[in-house]
Image (cartoon, grey):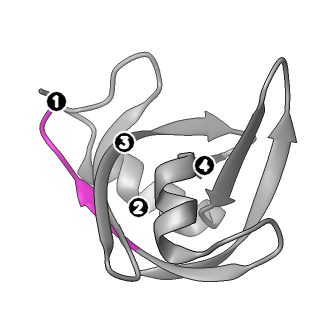
């Protein structure tokens, strides 16, 4: 589990993420080595009372947890909020 601040990454459409620390990212990369594809790691995530599956994106030595609108709306989250994130590697479906 880790705490992280929600930030917006603007591209063609806005996306919201929470960044893992470099050390947590390195640990997860080692644990999930057999699951990684195209640099992404499939994970099961819990934020508050919301559970979901997603794939982490690698960026600058860290993994980013993408937060879909449905997750942010369910937990009433916005950019700048600090959230507790629990995650574990998940088999690809």
Q: Residues under labels 1 and 2: Cα distance?
A: 19 Å
Task: Identify the residue under disc 3.
Answer: 54
Q: Nearer the viewer, residue 22 or 90?
A: 90
The answer to which of marks 1 and 4 sits earlier in the sequence is 4
Element at badge 3? strand
Q: Residues under labels 3 and 2: Cα distance?
A: 18 Å
Residue at position x 66%, y 75% in the image = 4
Q: Is residue 67 visible?
A: no
Task: Identify the residue under disc 2.
Answer: 27
Element at badge 4? strand
Residue at position x 33%, y 50% in the image = 30
Q: Residues under labels 4 and 2: Cα distance?
A: 14 Å
**At which x and y percent is residue 67?**
55, 51
Residue at position x 44%, y 16% in the image = 38
Task: Identify the residue under disc 1.
Answer: 92
Report the quarter where the C terminus lies.
top left
**At which x and y percent is residue 44?**
25, 55
The answer to which of marks 1 and 2 sits earlier in the sequence is 2
Q: Cβ–Cβ below 8 Å for labels 3 and 1?
A: no
Answer with the quarter of the image where residue 12 lies: top right
What segment carries the magenta color?
86-92
Q: Mark 1 vs mark 2: give the one in front.
A: 1
Task: Identify the residue under disc 4.
Answer: 64
Q: Residues under labels 1 and 4: Cα distance?
A: 18 Å
Q: Residues under labels 3 and 1: Cα distance?
A: 10 Å
The answer to which of marks 3 and 1 sits earlier in the sequence is 3
Q: Cβ–Cβ below 8 Å for labels 3 and 4?
A: no
Q: Is residue 87 magenta?
A: yes
Report the quarter where the N terminus lies.
bottom left
The answer to which of marks 3 and 2 sits earlier in the sequence is 2
Please, is residue 72 above or below residue 14 in the view? Answer: below
């Amino acid at each position: 589990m880790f705490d992280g601040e929600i930030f917006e990454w603007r591209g063609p459409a806005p996306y919201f993420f929470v960044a893992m620390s470099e050390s947590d990212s390195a640990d997860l990369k080692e644990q999930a080595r057999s699951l990684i594809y195209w640099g992404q790691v499939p994970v099961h995530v819990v934020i508050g009372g919301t559970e979901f599956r997603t794939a982490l994106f690698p960026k600058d030595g860290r993994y980013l947890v993408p937060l879909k609108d449905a997750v942010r709306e369910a937990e009433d989250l916005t950019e700048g909020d600090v959230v507790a994130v629990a995650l574990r590697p998940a088999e690809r479906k």
